[in-house]
Structures are given as C-alpha cells and as structure tokens.
Amino acid sequence: MPTVISSDGTEIFYKDWGSGQPVVFSHGWPLSSDDWDNQMLFFLNNGYRVIAHDRRGHGRSAQVADGHDMDHYADDLAAVTAHLDLRDAIHVGHSTGGGEVIRYLGRHGESRVAKAAIMSAIPPLMVQTDANPGGTPKSVFDDYQAQLAKNRSQFYTDVASGPFYGFNRPGAEPSDALIQNWWRQGMMGAALGGYTGIVAFSQTDFTDDLRKITVPVLVMHGDDDQIVPYADSAPLTAKLLKNGTLKTYPGFPHGMPTTHADTINADLLEFFRS
C-alpha cells in the first residue's frame, strides 16, 4: 500500500491515480478515502490526477494514540502533498475534510494550491459558544462520544441510516448498500480516532484560517443538512473568505456528494474549469 510518514512519524495511506492537474480529496468523519470513490472515478475520467488519503486513525492509516486534532490532520495532508510534490492542486473537502482543507491552507499556505471546494463543511465553528450562539450545544457532541463508547457499531449504523444521508426524512428511500458502506468505513478506523475526532470537528475554530485564504473557494452546502446545520456554517464561511462563493442546495442532506453525486460532480467540474 502506498503510504507516507507524517511529520510526527505517523503512517498515512493514500491513493494516487492518473495524470493532469491534481485534485486532492479530504474525507469526512469517521470515514476513509473510499468515500470519494464516485468523485475519484469521475474526475479521473475527465483528465485529472486524483489523490485521497485516509486520515490518521481512519481507514488504512495508522491507528495512533495521539494527534487527533486539526493541526495534525492538516500536517498529514501537507505530508501527502509534499511527498507527491503536488503543484497547482485543487483541494476538495467534505464535512470534517472541509475543515482539514481550511486548516491546511491557513497553516501551510497556498503555494501548492490553485483553488479549493468544501462541502457540508464544519467551518467556521460547530459548537455553541458565547461568540457563536447559533452553534450546536456541546451536550450533543458529548452524547455522540457516549454513544460511540457504549456501542460504536450501533452508533455508526444509526448515523448512516438516519441523519447523514437524510434517510430519516419523510418519503426518503434508504439505501442498505450506502448504510453498510458507511458502517464499513467507520468500523475500519480506530475507536479512538472516531471518539477524539468528535472533539476535533466540533470544537475547532477556523475563523482565522478562513481570513487568511486568498485562493478561490467554492462553499457548497445543502440546506437540509442535519449534521452540520446550514445557517451556522456555509454562509458564515463564505463571508469570511476573501474569494469565496456560496452555492446552496435546497433539500440536500449532509452526505450529498454520495446521494446527489451527479449534481455535485457537475458543479465541481464547472468550478475546476472556470
């Protein structure tokens, strides 16, 4: 398996297919690079070089005890881009991966990057604070951790079969294959990576990172996102970016890159080519 050693000695698995302008995908919690199967095949067939890695504690990367925070996630992404010597890259991040892309740009700069797209992403800040009154109460994330610690398999099944893809909405038609694949990816990773990742994605403030970024960023979000509520994320992110464009998808769920892949892929391709 192709791997790279990050700055703190952690082994990170990655995929690297094709040639052309590189597109680098950062996955959501608690999944893996496999969650980008549709997008990687689509953009490979459209002439791009596609790269995706498994975050530490997730997928096939090392199940280490330390470094489950956004700084280390960003450093691991930087290790992949440096190892492959990627230039003029387009970074795409979903959910926690969107935060990873934003922290990577804020922490490591834009010298290797042409533009970025984030979707259903966690910035600027998920948790409710005095400065972020519209955020999600910390008790919700504490409950996530409690459920994961009690029965990770059941918790992951409940997330995938319910709010992640919007399968709990009236009239929705749940897909057993998608639910099973989400569960498979989550269970492939470490319990600790999933447990501590909840703190990383919920409590990290990306405001300063967003203000630093100058490359074009497409901010994509469904207004029926039950995981990262729309009003406290995408519009605020777009306003903080110097060159951000907000694209809102009526009725789309958190997992829209999978449930509405054709629409998302077409919009990404148009942005890449613009």
Image (spheres, rainbow, N blue to C red):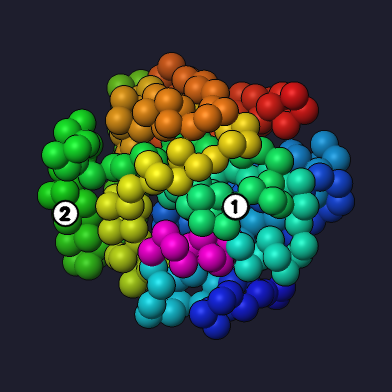
> How many neighbours does mark 2 have within 10 angstroms: few (below 14), some (14-19), or many (20 or more)?
few
| Left or right: 18 as drawn, with respect to 29 | right
Which residue reaches farthest top?
250
Q: Is residue 122 above or below residue 239?
A: below
Q: Is residue 133 above or below residue 139?
A: above
Q: Quadrant of the N terminus?
A: bottom right
Q: Quadrant of the C terminus?
A: top right
Name the residue that disc number 2 marks.
143
- The Cα atoms of the two marked residues, 2 and 1, are separated by 35 Å
Amino acid type for the residue under numbered disc 1 = Gly
Residue at coordinates 21% horizontally, 36% vertically from top-left?
132
| Mark seen at residue 109 | 1
Q: Magenta residues, as a range?
A: 69-77
| Left or right: 200 as drawn, with respect to 270 | left
- Is any atom of residue 129 visible in this view? yes
Specify whether residue 110 is painted magenta.
no
Residue 112 in percent (x, y) is at: 71, 52
Residue 262 in percent (x, y) is at: 64, 27
Residue 51 in percent (x, y) is at: 70, 55
Q: Is residue 15 above or below residue 215?
A: below
Residue at coordinates 29% horizontally, 42% vertically from top-left?
126
Viewer-closest of 178 and 47: 47
Amino acid type for the residue under numbered disc 2 = Asp
Residue at coordinates 43% horizontally, 25% vertically from top-left?
239
